[in-house]
Image (cartoon, grey):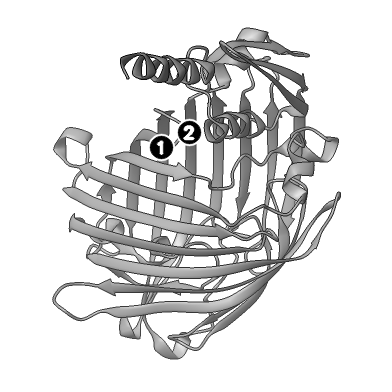
C-alpha cells in the first residue's frame, strides 16, 4: 500500500511538472525578442494551461502591430516549450475629417504604431468647429498608458422646462437651437477651458488603475451660475475580461490582422465578456478649485458573443455627487453609453442608468464588417429627494467597419422617448 501511494504521488508530481512552461523563444521582424517576450504574459516556470496560453496569445494580438503571429508549442516530459514567430511592422497614419450642417467642424489626426520597435501605439488629434477647438494626444506602451487633452468651448447653455438642458460641446453633432423654443426658459452664454492628463497602468491581465488630474475653468455671463476654477483629481480602477479591444489605424495597410482568420471563424461556444469600473473624483482648496467637489461613479457590463459572432451587451451605471456645483453635477449624457445622439440632457445629484444593444453582422468577410445594432438606453436623474427625471432613448445604427479600423461609420437613428424628439445623422466611431 505504501509503495502504491509513493508511486501515485510520484506520478502526480511528474504530471504537475509536465504542465510547467519550460522555455519560451521568439523570432521577430522589428522589435527585439526580449520586448515581445515581455508582452507575452505567460512566463517560464509558470503552470501551462490551455486557457492561460490562449489569453497570453490574445494579449499579443491586441497590440495590433503584427501582420502574422504564429505560436508553436512542443510538449515534453519535463515541460512545454513555446516558440513565437512574429512578423511585426510599423505604421504612421494621417487622417482628416469634416462635418457640415449646423455644427460645422473639421479635424486632423495622426496615429502611429510600433514606430520605436516597442509595440507601442500613439495618436495626436487637433480639430475645431463653430463652438471651439480641442487637441488630444496619447501613448500606450506595454502596461502603461498616457493621455493629455485640452479643449476650449464657447457655448450657449439653454434651460428648458421639465429640467432639460442643452448639451454643449466642440464636436456635438446635434444642435437644439430653434427646435425647442416653445419650452425654452432662458439661455446663458458660457466658456469652458479643460486641460486633463491621465496615467493608467495595467496591474494584471484584467485589472488596471488610473489617476487623472484635471484643470477645468468655467466663465458664465450670469452671476447665478458657478464661474471659476473647478479643478479636481479622479482615481479609477477597472476590471475587463474578454472585452473586444485593440483596434488600430494600421488596419488598412494590413497591420494588426494577425488574428483575423481566427476572428472570422465561428466560436466553438458562447464567450462572455465582463467589465467593471469605479471612479472617485475630488476637488477643493487643495486642488485649486473654488468649489468642493466629491463624486463617485460605478459601472459595469456583460457581453455575450455568440457562436456566429453576433453580440448581446448589457450595461449599468450609477453616479453620485456628494458635493458639486452646477457644472460638475451628474449629467444624463455621461450616464448613457454613447449609442444614441441627443440634443438635450438632464442634470442632478444622483443618477442611474441601464442599456442594452444587440449587434447583428449582416456581412462579415475579409474586407470588413457590416452590422446593424438596435439599442435601448435609459437614465434616471435626481436633484434630491425621491423624484427622478428620465432620459431614455431607442434606435439603431447601420454601420460598416474595415477590418480592425477604429472608426466605423454609418447612419444612426435615435428617438428620445421622453421629449418625443428624434435624430437621424451620420456617425463615426462609437459603440458598434
Displayed quadrant of residue 255: top right
Residue closer to the observer: 71 or 203: 71
Point 75% across, 25% down: residue:
70
Tally of numbered discs: 2
Quadrant the N terminus occupies: top left
Q: Are marks 2 and 1 in contact (CB under 8 Å)?
A: yes
Q: Is residue 289 left or right of residue 17?
A: left
> Between marks 2 and 1, how big is the CA–CA gap?
6 Å
Residue 215: x, y in percent? 34, 39
Determine if residue 354 is in view: yes
Residue 248: x, y in percent? 69, 38
Q: Is residue 239 left or right of residue 284?
A: right
Point 38% across, 63% down: residue:
316
Residue 2: x, y in percent? 31, 15
Point 82% across, 40% down: residue:
252
Point 28% across, 41% down: residue:
231
Q: Give the structural element (helix, strand or loop) at label 2.
A: strand
Relative to 274, is 395 above or below? below
Quadrant the C terminus occupies: bottom right
Q: Which residue is mark 1?
A: 196
Q: Give the structural element (helix, strand or loop) at label 1.
A: strand
Amino acid at each position: 500500500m505504501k509503495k502504491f501511494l509513493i508511486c501515485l504521488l510520484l506520478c502526480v508530481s511528474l504530471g504537475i511538472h509536465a504542465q510547467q512552461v519550460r522555455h519560451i523563444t521568439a523570432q521577430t521582424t522589428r522589435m527585439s525578442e526580449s520586448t515581445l517576450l515581455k508582452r507575452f504574459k505567460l512566463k517560464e516556470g509558470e503552470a501551462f494551461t490551455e486557457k492561460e496560453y490562449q489569453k497570453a496569445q490574445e494579449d499579443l494580438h491586441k497590440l495590433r502591430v503584427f501582420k502574422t503571429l504564429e505560436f508553436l508549442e512542443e510538449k515534453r516530459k519535463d515541460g512545454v516549450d513555446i516558440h513565437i514567430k512574429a512578423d511585426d511592422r510599423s505604421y504612421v497614419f494621417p487622417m482628416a475629417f469634416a462635418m457640415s450642417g449646423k455644427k460645422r467642424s473639421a479635424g486632423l489626426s495622426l496615429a502611429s504604431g510600433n514606430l520605436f520597435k516597442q509595440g507601442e501605439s500613439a495618436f495626436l488629434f487637433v480639430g475645431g468647429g463653430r463652438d471651439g477647438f480641442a487637441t488630444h494626444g496619447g501613448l500606450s506602451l506595454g502596461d502603461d498608458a498616457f493621455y493629455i487633452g485640452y479643449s476650449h468651448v464657447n457655448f450657449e447653455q439653454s434651460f428648458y422646462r421639465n429640467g432639460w438642458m442643452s448639451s454643449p460641446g466642440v464636436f456635438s453633432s446635434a444642435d437644439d437651437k430653434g427646435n425647442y423654443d416653445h419650452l425654452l426658459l432662458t439661455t446663458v452664454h458660457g466658456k469652458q477651458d479643460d486641460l486633463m492628463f491621465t496615467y493608467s497602468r495595467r496591474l494584471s491581465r484584467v485589472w488596471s488603475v488610473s489617476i487623472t488630474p484635471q484643470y477645468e475653468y468655467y466663465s458664465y455671463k450670469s452671476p447665478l451660475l458657478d464661474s471659476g476654477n473647478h479643478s479636481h483629481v479622479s482615481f479609477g480602477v477597472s476590471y475587463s475580461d474578454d472585452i473586444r479591444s485593440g483596434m488600430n489605424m494600421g488596419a488598412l495597410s494590413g497591420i494588426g490582422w494577425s488574428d483575423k482568420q481566427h476572428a472570422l471563424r465561428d466560436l466553438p461556444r458562447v464567450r462572455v465578456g465582463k467589465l467593471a469600473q469605479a471612479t472617485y473624483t475630488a476637488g477643493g482648496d487643495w486642488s485649486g478649485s473654488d468649489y468642493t467637489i466629491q463624486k463617485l461613479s460605478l459601472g459595469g457590463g456583460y457581453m455575450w458573443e455568440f457562436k456566429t459572432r453576433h453580440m448581446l451587451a448589457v450595461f449599468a451605471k450609477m453616479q453620485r455627487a456628494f458635493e458639486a456645483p452646477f457644472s460638475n453635477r451628474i449629467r444624463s449624457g455621461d450616464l448613457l453609453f454613447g449609442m444614441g445622439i441627443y440634443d438635450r440632457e438632464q442634470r442632478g445629484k444622483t443618477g442611474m442608468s441601464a442599456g442594452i444593444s444587440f449587434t447583428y453582422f449582416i456581412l462579415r468577410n475579409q474586407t470588413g464588417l457590416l452590422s446593424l445594432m438596435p439599442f435601448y438606453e435609459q437614465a434616471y436623474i435626481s436633484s434630491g429627494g425621491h423624484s427622478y427625471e428620465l432620459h431614455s432613448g431607442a434606435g439603431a445604427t447601420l454601420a460598416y467597419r474595415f477590418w480592425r479600423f477604429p472608426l466605423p461609420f454609418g447612419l444612426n437613428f435615435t428617438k428620445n422617448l421622453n421629449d418625443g424628439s428624434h435624430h437621424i445623422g451620420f456617425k463615426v466611431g462609437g459603440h458598434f
